[in-house]
Image: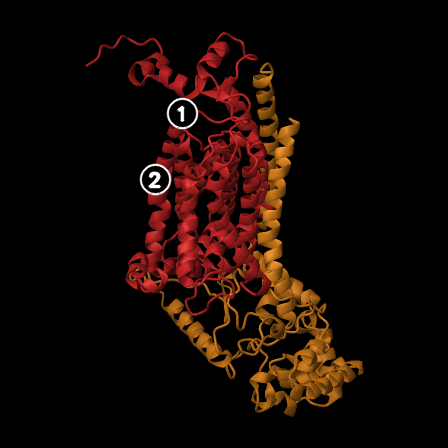
């Protein structure tokens, strides 16, 4: 018995060392380590990674953002100014310059305040994709904002309005659709870049579903526009939850450039609550069996514990008089 | 036509026709197993059970898997995981089982090496076992292609490329294997066939052969002692259970096997429910894309040691080294020149050889997954060379071994 336990100990030790080597250790060596910054958007990472000629501009930009953040915003005044935003940010908005303007229905709930200020001030800088716009932010699809809302107090007012009036309860699916869904489809969640896939019916005589064909065409056109604008079609995020570690997703969402230098993906500026909502949705589509596993696991393990106890008793009865 | 009496029971009826009682004696009640064994002797039955689990879970997955390059990925990741009742369970059992079957194979192999269970009379047990290892490797590789993720595609690309033979440039052979210039529909279809038909058939055949090679030499025991099976069997039948050196396969040996299996299944299902990610590489959750090579391409952990023997050398010597590593274990019974059948700890230099080989393969495994840069490639190269040095040293140190 003692000898068997000793052998078991050796086998278990080798197995654990093996596991450590090919899993935690190998992965720690394979991926570069990126520090998270707890969804604080103050430009620290942007300034750090910026090339020499851009460092000063970024420092200046983020210090101005900091100043605006100190102003007290007036939500009522902000509502009036927001009218200018609503021209593009509305339900059923059309693709503009490659991408469809997002709904801001829950912007105050899911996005960080500092980020929203920065975004209105300079969308390319705020999303850390200024390298894509060498001719200035005016060529950014949202570039014209600087001619509409540029006074610090106006910016503070709009953000105060968003934080006050566009901050209702948001479902995880809405958070995904607003923050990610214009560029990333989620086919397991039945979402395209245009939103929920509508229910259509095929003609019973021909089997043809004309509405579906029309919808598919619209999706195809949207995807082509996105790919032309961003350089490639952003990946479907159905099971990105299984394909990347949680740490990767968190740091990538905070600052895409930190994990994928040069990417066309803009920072989305999610705050912690928004990030958690999005992750909740990604977990639902990427790992839908989690609740079922949690339910069945203890029963199956319980069965095998019982099985093992009975097997042990049987073994003892068979081996009792052997020595 | 032989003469048949009227049978009085089903047992008798079957006995007349297929010799049931003889069969039971040969396979169970008088299949003598030495008493002096430990739980490592149960690994064979644990493997058989794991294969059974893989077979059953595979049958369920097969009912929903779609072997087309357009649909394969979603049939695995969506249909099976979401729409099929308990599809996720079958998939995680299959994935975890595929990994654990290799863990147990390696334990089973190194048990055989440690106790000298491949020596005179038992060579075919070892060789048929190694044949099973190769067949399981082919089964694992072909199965890994089926979800058609990034790692399926790129591992398939890399491994099939090996058949070009380096500077031989046998590109025609590679195309013949793939059925296309790159892994595509023809490739997926044939690996699907290999995985669900040809390889399982071959494995079942090889398992029967492996069991067959064991029946006459009998299994080894902890001290490598030559057992007088006839004398021991006589004692057992006389009821002298304590005096006899043997036990019957069923029910005595089996009762311990089943207990060990129970412990194993607790671990198995713990992994299935709470820690299955280790068996499913994240990279393979990105759909196959011939236009985007993953940053790191590496095989599953059980192939890493041989992958690392390929990697540190230039192309041609690397391929030769790789080919050597694939077959060298087959020759173990002939390279070990010592007649001693004993556990390694009683065999002097061989004892060191055993642990050195085990440690070296562990180091190779670690290095096989790491990016081949800096210190990692140096360690990999040293470990690969050590592997060959150990095999060259084996006949020499065993020739010099003192007879026990």
Give the chain of mark 1: B
Q: Residue lying farthest left?
A: B1
Q: Is residue B177 visible?
A: yes
Q: Position of residue A223 (x, y in %)?
A: 46, 74
Dot 1 surroundings within 10 Å: few (below 14), some, or many (20 or more)?
some
Asked if A108 appears above or below B207 in the picture, the reply is below
Asked if B213 appears above or below B297 in the picture, the reply is above
What residue does disc 2 label?
B201
Q: Nearer the viewer, residue B131 or A255?
A: B131
Position of the C terminus of chain A by quadrant: top right
Query: Left or right: where does residue B53 sit relative to residue B124?
Result: right
Dot 2 surroundings within 10 Å: few (below 14), some, or many (20 or more)?
few
Q: Which tint is chain A?
A: orange
Q: Position of residue B131 (x, y in %)?
A: 39, 40
Q: Position of residue A217 (x, y in %)?
A: 40, 73
Dot 1: element: helix
Q: Nearer the viewer, residue A52 or A154?
A: A52
Q: Which tint is chain B?
A: red
Q: Nearer the viewer, residue B355 or B246?
A: B355
Q: How is the image coloured?
A: by chain
Query: Left or right: where does residue B265 sit relative to residue B234?
Result: right
How many dots with numbers?
A: 2
Query: Left or right: where does residue B337 sit relative to residue A308?
Result: left
The image quadrant that residue A110 belongs to is: bottom right
Please give the label number shown on residue B215.
Answer: 1
Frontmost of labels 2 and 1 is 1
Q: Position of residue A68 (x, y in %)?
A: 76, 84
Position of the N terminus of chain A by quadrant: top right
């Amino acid at each position: 018995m003692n000898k068997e336990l000793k052998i078991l100990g050796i086998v278990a030790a080798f197995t654990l060392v093996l596991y450590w080597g090919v899993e935690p250790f190998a992965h720690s060596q394979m991926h570069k380590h990126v520090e998270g910054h707890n969804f604080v958007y103050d430009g620290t990472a942007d300034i750090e990674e910026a090339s020499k000629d851009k460092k000063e501009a970024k420092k200046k930009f983020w210090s101005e953002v900091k100043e605006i953040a100190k102003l007290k915003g007036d939500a009522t005044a902000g509502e009036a100014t927001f009218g200018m935003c609503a021209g593009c940010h509305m339900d059923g908005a059309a693709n503009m310059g490659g991408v469809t303007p997002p709904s801001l229905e829950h912007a105050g709930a899911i996005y960080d305040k500092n980020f929203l200020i920065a975004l209105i001030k300079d969308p390319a800088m705020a999303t850390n994709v200024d390298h894509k716009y060498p001719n200035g932010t005016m060529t950014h699809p949202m570039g014209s904002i600087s001619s509409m809302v540029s006074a610090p107090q106006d910016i503070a007012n709009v953000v105060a309005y968003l934080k006050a009036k566009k901050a209702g309860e948001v479902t995880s699916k809405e958070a995904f659709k607003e923050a990610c869904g214009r560029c990333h489809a989620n086919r397991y969640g039945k979402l395209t870049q245009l939103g929920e896939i509508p229910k259509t019916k095929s003609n019973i005589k021909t089997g043809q579903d004309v509405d579906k064909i029309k919808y598919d065409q619209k999706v195809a056109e949207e995807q082509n526009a996105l790919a032309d604008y961003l350089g490639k079609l952003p990946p479907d995020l159905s099971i990105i939850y299984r394909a990347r570690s949680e740490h990767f997703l968190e740091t990538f969402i905070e600052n895409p450039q930190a994990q994928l230098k040069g990417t066309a993906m803009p920072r989305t500026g999610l705050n912690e609550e928004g990030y958690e909502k999005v992750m909740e949705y990604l977990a639902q589509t990427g790992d839908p069996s989690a609740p079922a596993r949690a339910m069945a696991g203890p029963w199956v393990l319980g069965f095998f514990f019982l099985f093992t106890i009975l097997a042990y008793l049987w073994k003892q009865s068979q081996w009792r008089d052997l020595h | 036509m032989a003469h048949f009496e009227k049978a009085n029971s089903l047992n008798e009826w079957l006995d007349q026709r297929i010799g049931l009682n003889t069969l039971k004696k040969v396979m169970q009640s008088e299949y003598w197993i030495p008493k002096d064994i430990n739980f490592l002797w149960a690994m064979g039955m644990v493997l058989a059970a794991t294969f059974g689990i893989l077979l059953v879970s595979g049958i369920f997955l097969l009912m929903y898997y779609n072997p087309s390059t357009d649909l394969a990925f979603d049939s695995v990741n969506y249909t099976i995981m979401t729409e099929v009742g308990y599809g996720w369970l079958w998939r995680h059992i299959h994935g975890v089982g595929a990994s654990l079957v290799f863990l147990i194979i390696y334990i089973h192999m190194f048990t055989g090496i440690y106790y000298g269970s491949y020596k005179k009379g038992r060579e075919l047990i070892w060789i048929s076992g190694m044949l099973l290892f190769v067949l399981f490797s082919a089964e694992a590789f072909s199965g890994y292609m089926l979800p058609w993720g990034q790692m399926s595609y790129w591992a398939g690309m890399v491994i099939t490329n090996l058949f070009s033979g380096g500077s031989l440039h046998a590109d025609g052979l590679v195309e013949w294997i793939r059925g296309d210039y790159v892994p595509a529909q023809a490739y997926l279809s044939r690996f699907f066939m290999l995985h669900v038909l040809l390889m399982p058939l071959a494995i079942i055949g090889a398992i029967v052969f492996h069991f067959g090679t064991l029946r006459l030499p009998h299994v080894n025991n902890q001290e490598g002692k030559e057992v007088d099976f006839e004398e021991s069997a006589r004692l057992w039948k006389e009821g002298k259970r304590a005096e006899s050196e043997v036990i019957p396969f069923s029910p005595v040996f089996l009762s311990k096997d089943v207990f060990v299996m129970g412990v194993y299944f607790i671990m198995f299902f713990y992994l299935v429910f709470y820690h299955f990610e280790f068996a499913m590489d994240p990279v393979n959750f990105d759909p196959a894309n011939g236009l985007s090579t993953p940053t790191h391409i590496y095989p599953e952990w059980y192939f890493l040691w041989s992958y690392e023997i390929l990697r540190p050398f230039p192309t041609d010597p690397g391929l030769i080294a790789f080919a050597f590593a694939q077959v060298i274990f087959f020759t173990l019974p002939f390279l070990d020149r010592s007649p001693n059948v004993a556990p390694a700890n009683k065999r002097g230099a061989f004892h060191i050889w055993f642990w050195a080989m085990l440690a070296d393969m562990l180091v190779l495994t670690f290095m096989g997954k790491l990016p081949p840069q800096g210190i990692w490639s140096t360690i990999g190269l040293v470990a690969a060379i050590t592997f060959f040095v150990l095999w060259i040293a084996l006949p020499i140190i065993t020739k010099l071994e003192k007879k026990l």
